[in-house]
Amino acid sequence: MVDSQAHVDAVARLRASYAAIPPGQPVRLAKRTSNLFRPRTAAKDLAGLDISGLDGVISVDPQARTADVQGMCTYERLVEATLPYGLMPMVVPQLKTITLGGAVTGLGIESSSFRNGLPHESVIEMDILTGEGKLLTVSPEQHPDLFAGFPNSYGSLGYAVRLRIALDEVKPYVGLRHVPFDDLDTLCSAVADITAKRSWDGEPVDFLDGVVFGPGEAYLTLGRWADWPRDAGQAEPSDYTGQQIFYRSIRERERDCLTVSDYIWRWDTDWFWCSGAFGVQNPTIRRIWPARYRRSDFYHRLVGLDHRFSIAAKIDKLKRIGPRERVVQDVEIPLEHTADFLRWFAGQVPMSPVWLCPLRLRDSDDPAARSWPLYPLQPGEVYVNVGFWGTVPIEPGRADGDVNRLIEDAVASRHGHKSLYSDAYYDRDTFSAMYGGAVYSQLKDRYDPAHRLTGMYEKAVGRR
C-alpha cells in the first residue's frame, strides 16, 4: 500500500513539474511504457510530467468494498492488493500492465463486462489534473461533465491521479465450461439468453467470453465462482502459466477450473494467442523461454523493437514475402449485427482466431443510467467486443491501411464503435460524430483552454 503522505508528496511533485513547463508549451506524461498500438509523439518533442510515486494502491475498504488507487497503478498491483480481502475490481482488463487510469481514460473490457459494464462505470470519484493544471475532484456530483466525458478521452482532457472504485466479491476458484457452436447466429442467441438470465443450462454464469476459430467453429466460455476445484469437477485447478496454453484448451476440454488469480490473467501469459509470433508456443522454445518473460508486456516490448528496426519486414524481404498490414483492433458491435459482422470479417480479413466479449452498460436497466458521451453505447443494448490482433498481406492494388479502413466502414455500417488504442483512419468530421463531437469540444475548451494536451483526434488519427 502507498502511505497517504507519500501520495500527497507524489501529487505535489506532479503539480510542480507542470508548473515548471513554460506557458504555451505542450504537456505530456513522462511515461516510458504504453499499451497503445499506434505511434506516440517522440518524447524529446514534449515536456514530461513527473508521475513517480503514483503507481500504487492507497487503501482498500473491505466493508464498503472500495479502493483508492493511484492513476498509474497497474491492474497487476491492484489485483494483488484486493484479492487478500476477497475482492477484485468489477472489471479487470486482460493484460497485467494496463493501468487503472489508462483503462478509464482509454476504455477496457473483460468477461465480467456482460454484468459489470466497462471499468469507468465502477469509478466513484477521481482526482484529475486537467490540461489547465488544476487538480479537480470529479464525481457525478462534482464537475459531472468532466466525470462523464473523461472515459475515452485518452488523456486529452487531463490525467487521473487518484480513483476511488467499487470492488466485487470473489471466491477462490472459477469453474469454466467451453460450449461449442457451429453456427454464429445460434451463438449470438445464446449470448442474449445468458446476458438476460446470467445462467445457462441450469448453471449460473458469472463470466462470459468466447473465441471464434472460424465461421463453423466457435466457443463461448462460461465461468462461475467456485469454493473448491471439485465444485467444478476437478481434483486440482489447471495451470496455464507453464507449458500448457489456455486458448488451445478451449478446443480440448469441455470443463476446466482455475484459481481466481490464474483466471484473471489467463490471457496474459500468451498475450491471448499472439505469443505464437515469437515462437513461444513451440514446445521446445517454450521449455527454455524464462517464465518471467512469458507475459504481455515483454511481448509488447518485442513488438516495439520490431516497429523501431523493421525486423520482421526485413526478414520477409529476404524470404521474398510481400509487405503486410498491421490489423490490431477491438470493436463493439450490437449483438443483433455480430454474426453478420463475423461472417463479413471471415470473408474479408484472413485472420483467426478472434476474441468475443459481450457487454452491457452497468445498471443499463435503469432509465436514469449515466451516459458516456465520448463513447456513446446505448443503455440496455447488448454489444459484443470483437478483438483481432495480427497482420494480413497487402494484396496487389491495395495500400497499407486499406484493410483497417474496410473494417472501420464495416463497423460503422453495423452501428458499432471502435476503440482508439490502435491505428485509426477516420476523417475529422466522421471522428467527431462518433466520439463526442460538440460535447468533447466544450470539455476541451473548459478544462484545457490553452489546448496544452494533445487533442483526441490528433492522438488517434491526426498523423495520417
Image: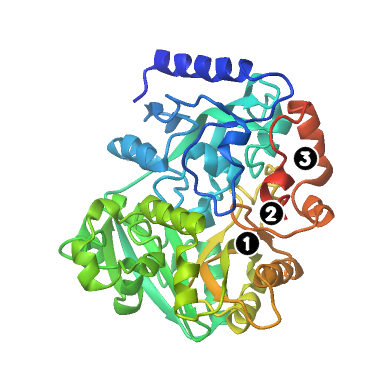
| Label 3 vs 1, first from the N-terminus | 1
* Disc 1 to disc 2, C-alpha distance: 9 Å
Which x, y percent locates residue 330?
58, 61
Residue corresponding to mark 3: 440
User: What residue appears at the point 64 percent right and 50 percent down from the top-left corner?
Assistant: 364
User: What residue appears at the point 68 percent right and 27 percent down from the top-left corner?
Assistant: 131
User: What residue appears at the point 67 percent right and 44 percent down from the top-left corner?
Assistant: 369
From the image, state whether disc 2 or disc 3 is nearer to you: 3
Task: Please tell me in which quadrant of the rendered image residue 417 appears.
Answer: bottom right
Mark 2 residue crowding within 10 angstroms, few (<14) / some (14–19) / many (20+): many
In the rendered view, would you say 371 is above or below 13? below
Residue corresponding to mark 1: 332
Give, as a three-letter code, the residue at label 3: Tyr
For mark 2, give the secondary structure.
Answer: loop
In the rendered view, would you say 362 is above or below 50? below
Instruction: Say the numbered circle drawn on residue 158.
Output: none
Q: Give the quadrant of the N terminus.
A: top left
**Labelled pair 1, 2 in contact (Cβ < 8 Å):** yes
Give, as a three-letter code, the residue at label 2: Leu
Residue corresponding to mark 2: 377
Of the pair 178 and 102, the residue shown nearer to us: 102
From the image, state whether disc 1 or disc 2 is nearer to you: 1
Which x, y percent locates residue 149?
70, 38
Would residue 318 appear left or right of 280 to someone viewing this image? right
**Labelled pair 3, 1 in contact (Cβ < 8 Å):** no
For mark 3, give the secondary structure.
Answer: helix
| Label 2 vs 3, first from the N-terminus | 2
